Image (spheres, coloured by chain):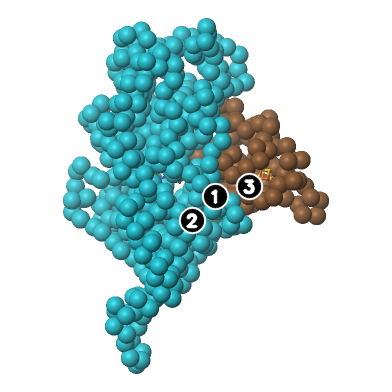
Amino acid sequence: MNIDEIFDFTSFTIDREPHIVLDTTVCAGCDNRGCTNSCPARCYTWSEEEQKMTFVHDGCLECGTCYVVCHKSAFTRWRYPRGGYGVAYRMT
Amino acid sequence: MSKQYQAIIVGAGPAGSSAALTMALAGLDVALIERGAFPGEKNMFGGILHRMTSIEELMPDFWTKAPLERHIAKKGTTFLTREASFNVQHETVNFDRAPYNGYTVFRPRFDRWLAEEAVKAGATLITRSTVDDLIYKNDRIAGVSILGRAGQIKAPVVIAADGVLSFTAQKAGLRRPKFNADQMAVGVKALIDMPREMIDDRFGLVRDQGFANEFVGATSGVRGGGFLYTNYDSLSIGLVFHLASLRVSGKTPYDMLNEFMEQPQVAKLVRGGRLMEYSAHVIPEGGYNMIPELAGNGILVAGDAAALCNATGVNLEGINLASHSGILAGKTVIEAHQRQDFSLKTLKRYKERLDLSWVMKDLKGFRNAPRMLHIDRIYNEYPELVCSMMEHIYRIDGTPKVSIPKLVLREVKEKVGLKNAISDALTAWRAL
Ligand SMILES: Cc1cc2nc3c(=O)[nH]c(=O)nc-3n(C[C@H](O)[C@H](O)[C@H](O)COP(=O)(O)OP(=O)(O)OC[C@H]3O[C@@H](n4cnc5c(N)ncnc54)[C@H](O)[C@@H]3O)c2cc1C
Ligand code: SF4
Ligand code: SF4
């Protein structure tokens, strides 16, 4: 399983309006960045070179991990997507 | 959009639909609100629906009507290292006849079906609607608002059955604004497509028999465990990680899941299968000690929202607790309508009901289980110990044999340390 191909095996109805909004300036000063390895969909990427955090909500499984793992409350918004948007499991 | 109901249930998972069904059967006009396009669209779990005795009372033909997969006739536990595995299996004809002890199910099917049963009983299901906030009138809960939509859905009482993160309970001030990563876990799962005959042959199953296997040592040293369950023509295979441990491990859930599926003995079990779906979800594993306030003025909290999940290390029970708590919440709301009092004074009966039920008794009884699951040695050293001991016992190679008690002692000393082993055994004994 290659996580970069997540859109091939899990379905999403992507909302343009992100349901999670991150204050990346908080991330710049974070001492552990547990979100980057804990997120099961690899939505968080830290660039050591640019000292910059990138968050992409498109493949978010709405699992809740980052909400619990972030100890810095870096979210200016963390909610579920609007009704009908987001991950759409068929079987599971 | 502004309609008045007698009760609102936020979330059409097992807790919410069980509550809605209970109230609808009693003639209440209730709204069951779900953010998914259909109930179950957002939900995943490992895969075993345990006995649901409380819903059997509401619906005596539950087990013949529900969309089930295989019944669990065979259970196993595997201690796993990178190279080796040691299996313990249990099978009995008693688990091979009705009433069965559990079934594999798919949430998008099961949750949808259960919500439809509530609708048949008279509940109104409102899908594609994410509850945004509670609305108040004269300091009392009067309904909810929906994200991105004007108007309100009104009722004098709300049941928060919106799952583990329960923003509804948070907004009502019933759960703490921050979770403790020590009390939470995340599960990731791969659904693997596989022909039915292949599953039957591979796992030694006939008819509708199913197999459920748990794995210790499958999580690369991170606190957690693995599972493999058989559906009719697919396998559910996955890992669960404690978040406090995962966070500092530097490892990713998907890499560890891949490693797990590539472990030589596990690879043989999934060989020939095709990945169909990948999913993930957080689990409230803190047990009794993390239960929030269960009731407030005009509001009750049920299921995962109330952290009613029992992770003993042997089984993971959630849906059965969710459903039972939903039913008790529903009964309490029925009573509140009879009295026309939705204050905490009446609604706190819900907590009393729960305290008297097996739900709280089990959670209380296993309140120390989370402590046992925090013994890091379980996830690395013990599986190593078991597998290496078995290798020594089975190996015949012309060298003199060590007696088994001596071997056990030597291996325990070497791999775990005697003191640690005794203290861990005590912790485990107290926990279970
Ligand atoms: C990996 C894993 C393995 C598990 N294995 C098992 C197992 O084998 N057996 C078992 O019994 N349990 C298991 N569980 C636990 C079980 O899944 C849960 O305990 C159970 O689903 C709880 O039911 P619930 O109705 O309380 O919550 P949920 O099932 O989470 O349902 C909540 C519902 O509310 C909806 N919702 C949330 N917020 C809103 C909102 N704002 N507005 C509208 N709708 C909303 C969601 O879409 C969802 O449908 C497992 C869990 C996980 C994650
Ligand atoms: S843990 Fe929180 S603050 Fe740290 S990098 Fe991740 S999101 Fe940012
Ligand atoms: S909710 Fe889960 S999948 Fe989505 S960004 Fe957070 S950790 Fe990743």
The quarter holding residue B419 reads bottom left
Tell whether label 3 touches label 1 (CB within 8 Å): no
Q: CA distance from mark 2 to mark 3?
A: 17 Å
Residue B339 visible, this orientation: yes
Q: Colour of chain A?
A: brown
The single residue placed furthest to the right in the displayed view is A50
Whether B255 is drawn above or below A7: the answer is below
Q: CA distance from mark 1 to mark 3?
A: 11 Å
Q: State the mark number for residue A35.
A: 3
Say which chain tag 1 marks.
Answer: B
Say which chain tag 2 marks.
Answer: B
Give the residue displayed 34% in from the left and 40% down from the top: B363
Judge the density around disc 3: few (<14), some (14-19), many (≥20) Cα neighbours within 10 Å: many
Q: Is mark 3 within 8 Å of ligand 2?
A: yes
Residue designated by label 1: B244
What element does badge 2 sit on?
Answer: loop
The quarter holding residue B148 reads top right
Tell whether label 2 touches label 1 (CB within 8 Å): yes
Say which chain tag 3 marks.
Answer: A
Q: State the mark number for residue B223.
A: 2
Residue A74 image position (x, y, % from top left): 68, 38
Judge if badges 2 and 3 mark residues of a common chain.
no
What element does badge 1 sit on?
Answer: helix
Give the residue displayed 54% in from the left and 53% down from the top: B245
Residue B60 image position (x, y, % from top left): 22, 30
